[in-house]
Image (cartoon, rainbow, N blue to C red):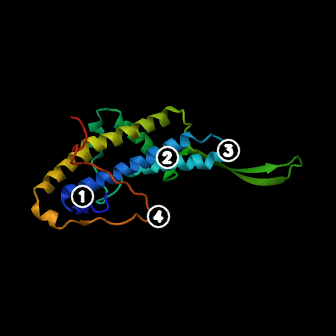
């Protein structure tokens, strides 16, 4: 944004819906980035926790897209239909099973095994009591699920932009162009983003090319 650019925060119902879709879109970016980062990390004992963290970050970030109450309530079914791919809903449920049964909670027995084991020596005397925990760090990167997850996230992200964000942006711009009082309240934008935040500046409509989406 130019330093002398004037801005007005929109508070309409359409602007509120746009903010919710934008927040969900940003979570898809997080999920996609986590999956891409995991691709570059060798599968080894020394990297197991990092690979697990990235997989769980992708699953949790993706799960946030459709979770929430009034602050984040978007029409996921409409998004799935807009993709034109009838498999999106079923795949969504598969990733959410990972979230509900393993990543966010511990309900799925297929994702983790825990055994309490008594060990004896030859005497036989009790030598030790061991707890053996085998917990999934996520599928391997060449697994069909992971590749499908990357493709699914990209499809939803692009569809969300083209079918929901851009049309709403066009509608809001039209309203702004016909609202003489809105321009009066414009003020210089805020300063730098705090270091403990990550920011995205999405240009959904620009005077030179509109939304930029060819229809």
CA gap, disc 4 and disc 3: 31 Å
- Residues at badges 2 and 1 in contact (C-beta under 8 Å)? no
* Badge number at residue 196: 4
* x, y percent for residue 75: 27, 47
Q: Residue at x 89, y 49 (%)?
A: 123
Q: Is residue 65 visible?
A: no
CA gap, disc 4 and disc 2: 19 Å
**Of the residues under marks 1 and 3, which one precedes in the sequence?**
1
Q: Which residue is mark 1?
A: 16
Q: Considering depth in this image, is 212 or 2 the residue closer to the camera?
A: 2
Quick one: SS at disc 4? loop
**Of the residues under marks 3 and 2, which one precedes in the sequence?**
2
Q: Residue at x 26, y 60 (%)?
A: 5
**Of the residues under marks 4 and 2, which one precedes in the sequence?**
2
Q: Which residue is mark 3?
A: 45
Give the number of the mark in front: 3 or 2.
2
CA gap, disc 1 and disc 3: 46 Å
* x, y percent for residue 191: 36, 66
CA gap, disc 3 and disc 2: 19 Å
Q: Which residue is mark 2?
A: 34
CA gap, disc 1 and disc 4: 25 Å
Quick one: SS at disc 3? helix
Compared with residue 17, is residue 151 higher up or lower down, i.e. above or below? above
Q: Considering depth in this image, is 179 or 114 the residue closer to the camera?
A: 179
């Amino acid at each position: 944004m130019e330093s002398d650019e004037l801005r007005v925060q929109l508070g309409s119902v359409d602007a509120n819906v746009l903010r919710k879709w934008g927040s969900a879109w940003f979570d898809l970016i997080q999920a996609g980035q986590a999956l891409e980062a995991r691709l570059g990390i060798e599968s080894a004992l020394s990297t197991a926790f990092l690979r697990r963290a990235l997989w769980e970050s992708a699953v949790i970030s993706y799960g946030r897209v459709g979770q929430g109450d009034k602050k984040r309530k978007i029409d996921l079914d409409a998004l799935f239909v807009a993709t034109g791919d009838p498999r999106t809903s079923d795949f969504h449920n598969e990733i959410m099973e990972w979230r509900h049964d393993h990543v966010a909670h511990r309900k799925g027995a297929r994702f983790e095994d825990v055994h309490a084991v008594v060990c004896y020596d030859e005497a036989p005397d009790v030598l030790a009591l061991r707890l053996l925990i085998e917990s999934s760090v996520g599928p391997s990167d060449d697994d069909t699920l992971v590749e499908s997850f990357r493709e699914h996230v990209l499809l939803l992200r692009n569809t969300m932009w083209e079918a929901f964000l851009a049309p709403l942006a066009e509608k809001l711009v039209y309203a702004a162009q016909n609202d003489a009082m809105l321009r009066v309240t414009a003020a210089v934008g805020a300063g730098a983003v705090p270091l403990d935040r990550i920011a995205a500046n999405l240009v959904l409509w620009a005077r030179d090319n509109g939304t930029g989406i060819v229809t």
